[in-house]
Image: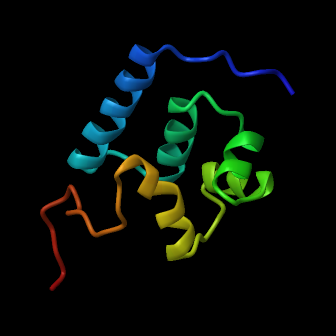
Amino acid sequence: MPAVKPLTKIEKRTRREEIFRKAASGELDFPNAVRDLRQSLGMTQAVFAERFGLTRVQVIALEGGKANPTLETLEKIGRPFGLQVGFVPIQSSNTNI
C-alpha cells in the first residue's frame, strides 16, 4: 500500500475548514465526510481505522457509502473533529408534513 504524503499544517487547516463549511451548508454527505476527515489527517484507511477503533473494511464501506454505521461509530469519528451527529435541513424547500 502506498504511503500517504504528509500534509502541512496549512493544508490540514484548509481541509478542515472546507469540511466545516460543507457541513454547515448541508453539502457534506457522509461517505465523502469520512474520506475528507481521514485525508485531512493525512492517514491511510488502515491507519485511520486503527486510530478510530474500526477495521479497514469498515472504513472502506463507510467511504463507499455501503455501511450502516451505529451512532457510536458516527460519534467516534466526528467527536475528535468537533462534529456531532444531528439533523440538518434538506436543501429542497419541499416538505411532506
Say how the picture is coloured: rainbow
Q: Is residue 27 left or right of residue 52?
A: left
Pick the front one: 45 or 79? 79
The outermost residue toward the right is: 1
Residue 70 percent location from the top left of the image: 56, 75
Q: Locate residue 72, reporting x and y percent.
A: 53, 73
Quarter-of-image position of residue 58: bottom right
Give the number of callouts. Answer: 0
In front of the other: 11 or 34: 11
Hey, which residue is sitting farthest bottom in the picture? 97
11 with respect to 59 (left or right): left
- Residue 45 drawn at (x, y percent): 72, 41
For the point 27% across and 69% down, which residue is it? 87
Quadrant where the C terminus lies? bottom left
> Residue 20 location in percent, x, y?
30, 41
Q: What residue is drawn where x is 78% and y is 51%?
A: 56
Among the 4 quarters of the image, the one containing residue 73: bottom right
Quarter containing the N terminus: top right
Is 38 above or below relative to 3? Answer: below
Residue found 71% across the figure and 50% down from its top: 49
At x 71%, y 59%, the residue is: 54
Residue in the foreground of this view, choosing between 43 and 96: 43
